[in-house]
Image (cartoon, helix red, strand yellow):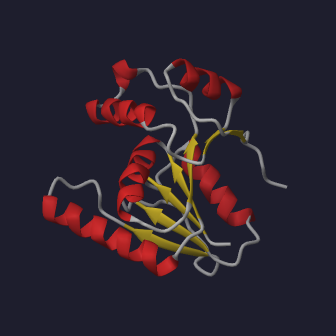
Amino acid sequence: MRILHIINNLQRGGAESMLIKLLNYSNQQKIIVFNLIGQNIYNIDQKKTILINFNFKTYNIIVLFYNLIKLIYLLYKYRPRSMIFWLYHSCFLSILIKIFYFKKVNYFWNIRQTVPDFKYEKFSTKIVFLLCRIFSNLPHGIIFNSKNAIESHKKYGFKNKNIIYIPNGFEP
């Protein structure tokens, strides 16, 4: 079974370190990771992981369009059976991928936090959060790492019939 993980970036953070732990402890032969911004501070075992970097942090419309075409092409090339989108911006991208990628794939959102305090967030994060809330019924399931995160997202209007609770600390 081929699983594709899509994450905003691989800079230092809780979700990022959980993905790295998952990659390190996985017994899957090859795991595919799409790194949307392309920043990476981790050493990733390239024998176990196919890491593909993108540049979605640009404001250049040509580069953004190129990255979207590259992403769609790579989806058809690797043909994942399941996609896991880590954090809000990646979850938002799943909405666009669902429009352009016509294969039957299980989509999961992996939200690794409680609802953020929006007075400290960028405007784009507020918009992406709002869009994710509106489209929260689209993925096959939403993975949360705490019961508090589940409750806070439900309170803010996230609606999905398949809530999956996987707490941190899954290593053997």
With respect to residue 93, does 38 lie above or below? below
Q: Residue at x 56, y 70 (%)?
A: 80
Q: Residue at x 14, y 65 (%)?
A: 62
**Residue that extends furthest to the right in the rendered view of this protein:** 172
Residue 125 in the image: state x and y as whole percent: 34, 34
Q: From the viewer's perspective, is 160 left or right of 22?
A: left
Number of disc labels: 0
User: Which residue is more in the foreground, 44 or 89?
Assistant: 89
Residue 8 in the image: state x and y as whole percent: 42, 52
Quarter of the picture containing the C terminus is bottom right
Residue 43 in the image: state x and y as whole percent: 56, 67
For residue 35, which quarter of the picture? Answer: bottom left
User: Which residue is more in the foreground, 20 or 156?
Assistant: 156
Q: Residue at x 28, y 67 (%)?
A: 67
For residue 117, which quarter of the picture? Answer: top left
Q: Residue at x 32, y 73 (%)?
A: 70
Q: From the viewer's perspective, is 107 left or right of 55?
A: right
Residue 1 in the image: state x and y as whole percent: 68, 72
For residue 24, which quarter of the picture? Answer: bottom right
